[in-house]
């Protein structure tokens, strides 16, 4: 299936389905990337051994010249240092302004290789070949970049891909925890924008967790199109795009407080979304949604409780900082109904404290 994403910069297709990597030459041809275009395939040392050779051979058999550059797997590769090293590889390979970058991997490779493409010779085109479920999120929106010792994603740019080819078969080798991690953002996309999609996810969670290609294709397509719709209405984060941060205010606080890598991003956001639903209930903004949110997330193998010894004052402090809000007042994305959220400013501290307590409790 194909989704066309329209941005101010360009319009590009996202192809989603099983076995699509073998059709990559045709997709490249469709966007005008002929065999004269020199290609640099960037991947990591976990994904590379599984798929890079296949991609390279497929392209080489049609006459493309492809260099492969591999970085270490994991968030640690998103650094200026790796960017510089990749630049060296590109220069040595003779990649010029007419060249192109292929990003084969998860969000880390997508962000790093995308930023390389944004910066190399002031910008060359790039193609995303996502291999994680979470990368359905990062393949839309055009945000690329690397981390700084003082903060995640602190150095970056907006650079839209020319094409995304999401072969859902690659997800079969993805560790279970990473599958759940990715579903957190799929569920988020449903909860912020599409009650029908929420119901569909509830009904299909079993076959989705089994990674059946048809429902998986559908879920990735819906997730991408919701993100694309939100982003296209608000390309530079002015207002609407904030809804994509549903569950992220508490999520980011949890991730940071636990120490990055302890909770996966999706796990932290899952608890954050349950918290947001509870807060919506506490403030009388929405009908009861917390239990339902919990059930959906559980079905995708995600945590829904605040387990671990977190200090409430520390979490509150981090949540205030996250949105640069004033003392004693918080900004959250909160639900109004199933599949509908909005930004709420000036939330007081007491209900947030109640939610943190409730998140530690049992099945209430
Ligand atoms: P990731 O790229 O680190 O992948 C997770 C792990 O799975 C890695 O160890 C990787 O080697 C491995 N892996 C990937 N695909 C595999 C496969 N098919 N089979 C086996 N192993 C595989 O992490 P991620 O969760 O995909 O992405 C997280 C990153 O995405 C973060 O850096 C985050 O900041 C970024 N992100 C960016 C955006 C954006 O808009 N640009 C949005 C969301 C997240
Ligand atoms: Zn997120």
Image (cartoon, rainbow, N blue to C red):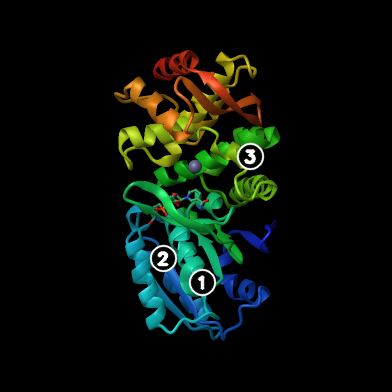
User: How far from the left and from the top, in percent, is residue 217?
Assistant: 61, 52
**Foreground pick, 308 / 200:** 308
Q: Mark 2 or mark 1, which has the lower sequence index?
A: 2
Q: Residues within 10 Å of mark 3 (few under 14, many from 20)?
A: few
Q: Is residue 49 visible?
A: no
Comparing marks 2 and 1, which lies closer to the viewer? 1
Comparing marks 3 and 2, which lies closer to the viewer? 3
For the point 68% across and 32% down, the residue is: 195
Instruction: Report the residue marked by disc 1.
Output: 122
Q: Is residue 206 above or below residue 279?
A: below
State the image quarter where residue 315 is shown.
top left
Instruction: Report the residue marked by disc 3.
Output: 239
Give the secondary structure at mark 3.
loop
Instruction: Report the residue marked by disc 2.
Output: 43
**Foreground pick, 287 / 10:** 10
Give the secondary structure at mark 2.
strand
Q: Is residue 135 above or below residue 325?
A: below
Q: Residues within 10 Å of mark 1 (few under 14, many from 20)?
A: few
Q: CA distance from mark 1 to mark 3?
A: 29 Å
Does 196 sit left or right of 271 as displayed?
right
Which numbered dot is residue 300? none
């Amino acid at each position: 299936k194909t989704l066309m994403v329209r941005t101010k910069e360009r319009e590009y297709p996202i192809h989603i389905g099983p076995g699509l990597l073998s059709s990559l030459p045709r997709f490249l041809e469709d966007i005008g990337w002929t065999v004269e275009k020199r290609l640099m395939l960037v991947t990591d040392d976990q994904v590379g051994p599984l798929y890079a050779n296949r991609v390279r051979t497929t392209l080489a058999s049609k006459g493309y010249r492809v260099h492969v550059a591999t970085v270490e797997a994991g968030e640690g590769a998103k650094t200026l240092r790796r960017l510089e090293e990749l630049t060296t590889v590109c220069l040595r390979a003779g990649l010029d302004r007419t060249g192109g970058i292929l990003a084969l991997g998860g969000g880390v490779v997508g962000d790093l290789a995308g930023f390389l493409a944004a910066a190399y010779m002031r910008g060359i085109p790039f193609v995303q070949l996502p291999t994680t479920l979470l990368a359905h999120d990062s393949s839309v929106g055009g945000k690329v970049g690397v981390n700084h010792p003082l903060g995640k994603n602190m150095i970056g740019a907006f650079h839209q891909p020319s094409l995304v080819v999401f072969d859902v078969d690659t997800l079969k080798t993805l560790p279970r925890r990473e599958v759940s991690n990715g579903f957190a953002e799929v569920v988020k996309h449903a909860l912020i924008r599409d009650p029908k999609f929420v119901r569909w996810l509830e009904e299909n969670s079993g076959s989705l967790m089994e990674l059946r290609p048809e429902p998986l294709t559908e879920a990735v397509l819906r997730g991408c199109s919701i993100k694309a719709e939100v982003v296209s209405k608000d390309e530079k984060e002015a207002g609407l795009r904030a809804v994509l941060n549903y569950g992220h205010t508490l999520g980011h606080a949890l991730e940071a407080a636990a120490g990055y890598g302890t909770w996966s991003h999706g796990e932290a956001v899952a608890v954050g979304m349950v918290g947001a639903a509870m807060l919506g209930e506490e403030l009388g903004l929405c009908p009861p949604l917390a239990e339902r949110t919990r059930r959906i997330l559980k079905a995708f193998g995600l945590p829904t409780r605040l387990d671990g010894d977190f200090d409430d004052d520390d979490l509150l402090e981090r949540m205030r900082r996250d949105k640069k809000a004033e003392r004693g007042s918080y900004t959250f994305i909160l639900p109004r109904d199933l599949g509908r959220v909005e930004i709420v400013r000036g939330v007081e501290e007491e209900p947030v404290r109640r939610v943190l307590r409730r998140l530690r409790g049992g099945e209430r």
